Amino acid sequence: MTSSGVQDYCDWCMGPLTEAARARSSWLGLPLEFAWACSDCLDAGRYRLPPDGWEGSAEDWLASDQYVLGVDDVTVIVNALNEVLHGPEAVEDWEFETRLGVTRAAALETLRRLNSNSSGGFFAGMV
Ligand SMILES: [Zn+2]
């Protein structure tokens, strides 16, 4: 712990946390279990199993069914969304929800969230 009371170490390897790792841990909801993972443990998927000292069963661990997207994954999604929303062959409003399964507004919101979090580099979604 730092003097400010903010945890600054990884609950899996005890290594230091970067701001990017803190952002990714938050995205995964790890702080809900008072856990934080460093970039190495996030990349290796160690967060999918509860850290030592976690009280509860492995089945109850919230992050076990999360998938972490890499930078390349996010780039593909952002580019694909840009194409269907703004590209020369953009999907028209009248057929957008039928073809994409979400409204144009929802797709724009997804694109906005991905772009605003792209500095963190990674995102979570259900597998
Ligand atoms: Zn770690």
Image (tube, grey):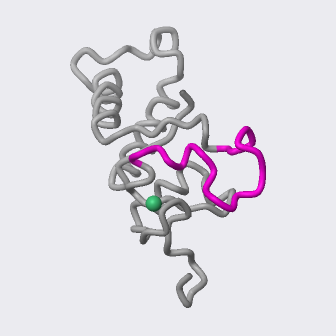
Picture coordinates of residue 59, whole percent (x, y): 73, 38
Magenta residue check for 60 = yes
**Residue positioned 61% across, 51% down in the render:** 29
From the image, which quarter does the C terminus lie in? top right
Q: Is residue 72 left or right of residue 100?
A: left
> Which residue is situated farthest in the right direction here?
56
- Does residue 15 sit above or below 108 in this rendering? below
Q: Looking at the image, which is closer to me, 125 or 15?
A: 15
Q: Is residue 51 left or right of residue 109?
A: right
Magenta residue check for 50 = yes
**Residue positioned 39% across, 68% down in the render:** 18
Q: Is residue 71 left or right of residue 35?
A: left
> Which residue is situated farthest in the bottom direction here?
3
Q: Is residue 99 left or right of residue 56?
A: left
> Which residue is situated farthest in the front direction here?
52
From the image, which quarter does the N terminus lie in? bottom right
Task: Read off the magenta span.
Answer: 43-62
> Where ligand 1 lies, by image quadrant?
bottom left
**Residue positioned 33% across, 55% down in the render:** 119
Picture coordinates of residue 116, whole percent (x, y): 39, 51
Q: Quadrant of residue 32?
A: bottom right
Q: Looking at the image, which is closer to me, 104 or 34?
A: 34
Picture coordinates of residue 48, whole percent (x, y): 56, 43
Picture coordinates of residue 40, whole percent (x, y): 38, 55
- Does residue 6 sit above or below 39 in this rendering? below
- Does residue 34 sit above or below 80 in this rendering? below
**Residue positioned 68% across, 62% down in the render:** 53
- Does residue 72 sit above or below 31 in this rendering? above
